[in-house]
Image: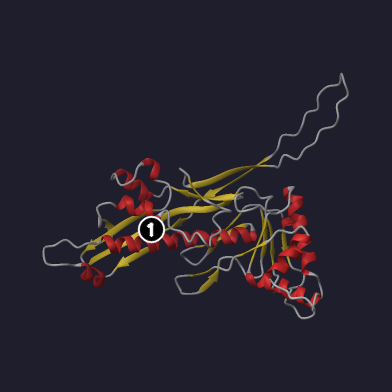
């Protein structure tokens, strides 16, 4: 199929689609979208400025300090291009009286919303992978996978020694949380602002407190109080589930995981969105300006023999971790 103008103002549909997101259930505050002019990512990550200098005696020379080393992380931004076909039945429904133009507008805008959400959901899944493991595993169209690792220290990655759900588990989960949180403080130089996890993990904390204090009523406030007493961050529950093309359900953030992070208003990276070839073509045709090229774009496609129409979303992008010291990942809590 080739590009065909199904509606007169595609720019409005594109800009509206870029705003679509489930704002109440997203990891984007930690890795917000950022348009870039490149089709590859590159970040220079400086070491944290944590040096001290010896005291200088009068009349002695100054002390040279070490320049922070810079680690260079780079790679290509992967493409995400879902397409929704407008079927012949849809076309017949849109057809009005003979010799009157078909109104594709409602169908295109509805399809644009769906492909835009599919693109954003794909990036959301990548964010969940990055925040739970420090890496992104890309599922390629040919069935293979490719991993992008952002160099989080092994000292900031943990697997629970014994699952909290294991028979005979006699540990104290709050003491384990304190141990993992100390690793965060050691790496980042400050306490974590939030503990990203799943509802089941929070329920297990409640269950432990019920066993420890059998005579007291235990609820969410009790768990919050215990965490606060131990100077641990409060949990942010995230249980979003997405569906792949084979209709398999998959969690964005894995069950039984905990990630210590700064607060949501302190991003630890970004989701870089670069310019697609489709957007470059739209700029040449006057649909988009040069400043509007980076980011999700939409194209409407068509054939006349047979009659086919489609709406395609096109984006290239990847969540990028900039502050590798501001994350601690724990997995295996529920086995």
Rendered location of residue 216, percent (x, y)? 77, 76
Where is residue 324? Give x, y as percent: 66, 50
Residue 138 visible in rendering: no
**Image: 47 above or below 9:** above
Q: How many marks?
A: 1
**Residue 200 lies in quadrant:** bottom right
Q: Residue at x 58, y 53 (%)?
A: 30
Q: Is residue 74 visible?
A: yes
- Residue found at x 58% / y 44%: 43
Where is mark 1, residue-wise?
Answer: 313
Residue at the bottom extreme? 167
The residue lying toward the viewer, choosing from 89 and 155, is: 89
- Residue 333 lies, in percent from the top left, at 71, 70
Badge 1 density bin: few <14, some 14–19, many ≥20, Cα 10 Å: many
The quarter of the displayed image where residue 225 is located: bottom right
Residue at 49% over, 67% down: 143
Secondary structure of residue under mark 1: strand
Q: Farthest residue in the left direction? A: 99
Quarter that holds the N terminus: bottom left
Q: Quadrant of the C terminus?
A: bottom right
């Amino acid at each position: 199929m080739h590009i065909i103008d199904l509606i007169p103002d595609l720019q409005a549909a594109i800009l509206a689609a870029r705003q679509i997101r489930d704002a109440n259930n997203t990891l984007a505050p930690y890795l917000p979208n950022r348009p870039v002019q490149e089709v590859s990512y590159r970040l220079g990550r400086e070491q944290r400025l944590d040096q001290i200098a010896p005291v200088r005696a009068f009349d002695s020379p100054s002390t040279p300090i070490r320049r922070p080393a810079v680690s260079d992380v780079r790679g290509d931004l992967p493409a995400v291009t879902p397409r929704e076909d407008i079927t012949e039945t849809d076309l017949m429904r849109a057809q009005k009286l003979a010799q009157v133009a078909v109104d594709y507008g409602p169908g295109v805008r509805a399809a644009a919303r769906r492909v835009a959400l599919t693109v954003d959901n794909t990036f959301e899944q990548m964010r969940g992978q990055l925040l739970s493991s420090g890496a992104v595993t890309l599922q390629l169209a040919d069935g293979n996978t490719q991993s992008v690792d952002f160099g989080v220290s092994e000292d900031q990655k943990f697997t629970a020694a014994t699952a909290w759900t294991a028979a005979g588990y006699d540990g104290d989960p709050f003491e384990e949380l304190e141990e993992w949180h100390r690793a965060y403080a050691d790496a980042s130089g400050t306490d974590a602002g939030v503990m990203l996890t799943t509802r089941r993990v929070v329920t297990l904390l409640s269950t432990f407190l019920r066993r420890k204090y059998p005579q007291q009523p235990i609820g969410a406030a009790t768990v919050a109080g215990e965490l606060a007493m131990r100077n641990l961050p409060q949990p942010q529950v995230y249980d979003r589930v997405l569906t792949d093309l084979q209709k398999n359900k998959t969690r964005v953030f894995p069950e039984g995981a905990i990630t210590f992070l700064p607060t949501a208003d302190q991003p630890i990276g970004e989701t870089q969105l670069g310019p697609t070839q489709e957007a470059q073509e739209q700029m040449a045709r006057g649909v988009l300006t040069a400043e509007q090229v980076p980011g999700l774009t939409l194209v409407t496609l068509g054939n006349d023999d047979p009659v086919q129409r489609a709406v395609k979303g096109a984006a290239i992008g990847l969540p990028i971790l900039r502050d590798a010291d501001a994350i601690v990942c724990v997995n295996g809590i529920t086995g």
